[in-house]
Image (cartoon, rainbow, N blue to C red):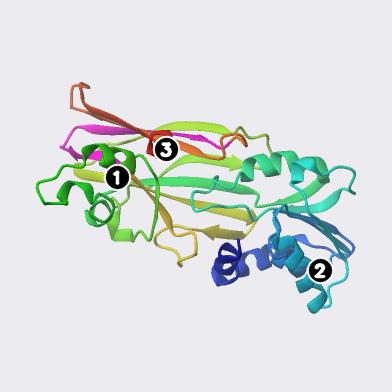
């Protein structure tokens, strides 16, 4: 937990974006609730920006440190609740609900589920931070990431590691992905979350490319609008954050010729009892629509107990 908090506090891109959002959202006399408050950084900013009261909800032991940090910094208008937010009842409604439970893969820390439940704490017309999340995907056309991840085919010593390789590649990898790693002009939105509306935990979409290229996997990242006019992005061409990007491997690289197409279907399940599961199906079609290859990877198959 403290290592995660170290990364968060050291991420100046993140910190400045949330400060800018809170400056716009926090009004004198307002009540702020921070779901998954960690060290209390966002709540402390809200207090300094004029919030009348801040409620910090955090189930982890870090909340005990947060109390000490509040005292050290002379912040006295905070209530600390050491519970999961779903177990919290009977607190005053807030003007601003903030939850920085964003993962490397945006949904892996159950931000949808936390905010959907947390909406019961929000006054009508209140502000949710972040307001929206857009999830983007692009084919990876450089070999750099695949070579780094897929070590199993070149072990040597006259040994084959096929079964271990398949388990390994049925996983997602946090990587620093460069703009030149992905297909130029190949970025597509595969998911959009608007927290002013009700959002489902199971999300799926198919996107298509028709470019002649070789695909070695797929890159995922997200763009969040914290409040109107204030954004935060983990895109490869934006300033690097601690989140970096996500690499989805394929079992076999897909060589796409002119006139052919590739379909990628991503399915995400972030229900509390699942935590997170991602699966991705890659289908390659020739010019007549015949399926040339079909491969499905699933994090459920990537676990080894």
**In which image quadrant can residue 165 be found?**
top left
Q: Residue at x 27, y 34 (%)?
A: 262
**In which image quadrant can residue 290 be found?**
top left
Where in the figure is residue 194, as x and y percent of width and height?
A: 62, 42
Q: Residue at x 55, y 59 (%)?
A: 232
| Residue 23 visible at all | no
Q: Residue at x 40, y 62 (%)?
A: 237
Which disc number belongs to residue 47? 2
Crowd tier of the residue under label 1, counting other residues whose Cα lies within 10 Å: few below 14, some 14–19, many 20 or above: many
Question: What's the distance in space between the residues labelled 3 and 1, CA to CA?
Answer: 15 Å
Q: Is residue 68 above or below residue 215?
A: below
Where in the figure is residue 73, as x and y percent of width and height?
A: 79, 78
Going from N to C along the chain, the mark reached first, 3 or 2, is 2
Going from N to C along the chain, the mark reached first, 1 or 2, is 2
Instruction: Name the residue that disc number 3 marks.
Output: 299
Which disc number belongs to residue 217? 1
Going from N to C along the chain, the mark reached first, 3 or 1, is 1
Query: Is residue 19 shown in magenta?
Result: no
Query: Is residue 269 shown in magenta?
Result: yes
**Which quadrant: the N terminus?**
bottom right
Q: Is residue 202 above or below residue 71?
A: above
**Which quadrant: the C terminus?**
top left
Which disc number belongs to residue 150? none
Nearer mark to the viewer, of 3 and 1: 3
């Amino acid at each position: 937990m403290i290592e995660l908090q170290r990364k968060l506090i050291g991420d100046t891109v993140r910190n400045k974006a949330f400060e800018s959002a809170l400056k716009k959202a926090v009004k004198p006399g307002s009540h702020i609730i921070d779901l998954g408050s960690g060290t209390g950084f966002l709540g402390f900013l809200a207090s300094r920006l004029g919030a009348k009261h801040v409620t910090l909800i955090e189930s982890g032991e870090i909340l005990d440190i947060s109390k000490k940090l509040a005292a050290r910094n002379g912040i006295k208008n905070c209530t600390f609740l050491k519970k999961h937010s779903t177990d919290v009842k009977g607190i005053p409604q807030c003007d601003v609900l903030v939850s920085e439970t964003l993962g490397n893969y945006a949904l892996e820390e159950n931000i949808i589920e936390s905010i959907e439940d947390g909406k019961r704490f929000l006054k009508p017309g209140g502000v949710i931070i972040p307001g929206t999340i857009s999830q983007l995907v692009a084919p990876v056309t450089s070999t750099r990431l695949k070579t780094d991840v897929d070590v199993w085919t070149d072990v040597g010593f006259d040994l084959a590691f096929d079964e271990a390789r398949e388990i390994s590649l049925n996983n997602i990898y946090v990587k620093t992905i460069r703009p030149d790693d992905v297909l130029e002009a190949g970025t597509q939105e595969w998911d959009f979350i608007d927290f002013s509306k009700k959002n489902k935990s199971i999300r799926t979409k198919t996107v298509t490319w028709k470019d002649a290229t070789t695909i070695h996997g797929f890159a995922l990242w997200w763009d969040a609008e914290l409040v109107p006019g204030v954004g935060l992005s983990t895109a490869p061409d934006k300033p690097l954050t601690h989140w970096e990007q996500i690499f989805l491997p394929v079992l076999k690289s897909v060589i796409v010729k002119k006139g052919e197409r590739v379909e990628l279907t991503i399915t995400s399940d972030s229900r509390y009892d699942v935590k997170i599961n991602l699966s991705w199906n890659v289908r390659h079609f020739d010019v007549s629509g015949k399926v040339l290859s079909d491969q499905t990877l699933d994090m459920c198959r990537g676990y080894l107990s």
